[in-house]
Amino acid sequence: MTASPLHIDGLPPTGALINGRWVDGGPRFVVDDKFSGRPVAEVAAATRAQVAEAVRVTRAAADGGAPPPHDRAQVLRRAAALMEGYRQRLVDVMVAEAGFTLADANGEVDRAMVTLSLSADEALRLVGDVIPFGASPGAHRRIGFTQRFPVGVVCAITPFNSPLNTVLHKVAPAYAAGNAVVLKPSAFTPLTGALLAQLLLEAGLPPAFLAVVQGEGDSVGAWLLEEQDIAFYTFTGSTRVGRIIQQAAGLRRTQMELGSIASTIVCADADLERAIPKIANAGLRKAGQVCTSVQRLYVQRDIAEEVGERLAAYARTLQAGDPRDPATKVGPLISEQSAIRAEQWLREAEQGGARLLCGGQRQRSVITPAVVTHAPQDGRVWCQEAFAPLLALRPFDDFEEALRDANATPFGLSAGVFTQDIDRALRAAATLRFGTVQINETSSARSDVMPFGGVKDSGFGKEGPAHAIREMTEERLVVFNP
Ligand code: NAD
């Protein structure tokens, strides 16, 4: 028996957005509610011709030149102001299609407003450098400066786990810089992206400057990679897909926010009152589906048992289940298949000698938050990105050994260290090969103003509007020789 559709008020149009018009497209795919499995909407995947048209229209807009910075900032500010009025619709859609709890969905909206405001500010201060020509013999009369120009068409390809704020971390700085954007949201969460596009148009974004094409990565995503009029790909998603996009981009520039196994280290002198709730939240919010989620937790041996017990006691208090229930802290994973995979990894770890201190029970797409110790060092819970509500704790005796082990993954997005010892904190900052090292914070404490991005297989390029706007512009040197 097929489940009856779930009605949600105020759903956005379900086709492609090209030149300010929503158009129906190719085959339709079902977007379901991630907790109940009930269908929410049918979305039309863009056709090959629509992808080409979206790029043609945005390219023409970019070639014609964007409105001046002041106007662009105003649009982004208006969008931030409009967002409160869109909050309920955005939250309802994210709770359904992403499975977010009410707190997680509202958190996305709060942060999205900040990202818009920061991007508006950056539109107004996109400046270059003055070149000190006097430093070169014979050149002292020259006057030179750099200016930044938009790259043209920016293609944003985005994941399911932050369908609003991660999309805005691409679209808002891209437009602030004067680019036109083609957005392809995740096929798990297409409605949030469409609703955001509606909001941006209402805020006055010129229609030709934003196109949205919906669909799967191996069709619509792959077609976008064939389009040579795209100047820049900004991608957040798995390392596997990042490699495919990078290969297709050739000499065109990209920004790659990829996979991760994030580590947090807790030393015996840590303030556990502060650290325990932070760690639990950072490992378990969005059901652990955050690129910086604490997955590996290294704890100094003297306090390892205490930390394990306190974390498990805390995790047991977190209600898992229906994301519409305000008491729920851990909602469903993005699919039942993802939950089955996580469950298998945990069972496999237990067979290899791991101890499950709490959780790890699955009901459809929901997994109760799990804290596990003694996970085999070559097992998947320890060695592959979990993207599930699980924290794996390992005791350490020697701080240097913990640093070495945290570094020994192919990834390098973010790490955290809890310690009161300044020398250890500085040693960690100098040694941990990650894009971000947080002291007295977990790996997962992002503020939208931060330069954010990884190293190694976690990618390259920085998000955070002030940084992304530089990525998405090209620098030109202008020299006067009087
Ligand atoms: P994914 O790589 O499966 O998909 C991301 C996007 O790429 C989707 O829109 C998808 O349709 C598209 N895509 C898939 N195949 C494609 C192809 N061949 N060509 C073009 N596009 C294609 O990732 P996901 O499962 O949606 O997200 C989870 C992953 O994202 C995790 O690995 C997580 O670590 C990563 N992530 C990283 C960051 C970061 O900042 N580093 C942030 C959030 C998520």
Image (cartoon, grey):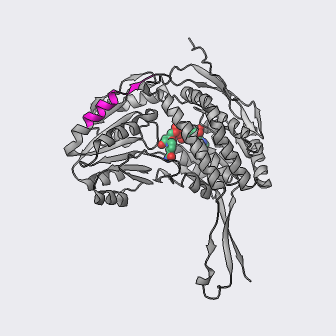
Extreme bottom residue here?
A: 138
Q: On the picture, is 309 further left or further right than 108?
A: left
Q: Quadrant of residue 140?
A: bottom right
Q: Is residue 255 visible?
A: yes
| 195 vs 37: above or below | below
Whether 142 is drawn above or below 297: the answer is below
274 lies left or right of 55: left
**Residue drawn at (63%, 37%) of the image:** 83
Residue 211 to residue 432: above or below:
above
Q: Position of residue 20 (x, y in %)?
A: 77, 38
Residue 409 visible in image: no
Report if residue 193 lies within the magenta region. no
Residue 456 location, x and y as percent? Answer: 45, 54
Instruction: Give me the residue at 75% from left, 55% from top.
Output: 68
Identify the residue at horizontal 46%, vertical 36% (top origin). Answer: 289
Viewer-side residue, 329 vs 462? 329
Main secondary structure along the magenta-highlighted residues: helix
How far across and how far down the image is residue 149, in percent?
Answer: 69, 61
Q: Quadrant of the C terminus?
A: bottom right
265 relative to 114 in the view: left or right: left
Residue 373, position as x, y percentages in the image: 27, 37
User: Which quarter shows the N terminus?
Assistant: top right
Q: For residue 314: magenta?
A: yes
Total marks drawn? 0
State the image quarter where residue 196 is shown.
top right
Ligand 1 shows up in the quarter that is: top right
Q: Nearer the viewer, residue 272 or 224?
A: 272
Tell me the quarter of the picture where residue 217 sits: top right
Q: Which residues are magenta?
A: 308-321
Of residue 464 and residue 163, the one placed in the foreground of this image is 464
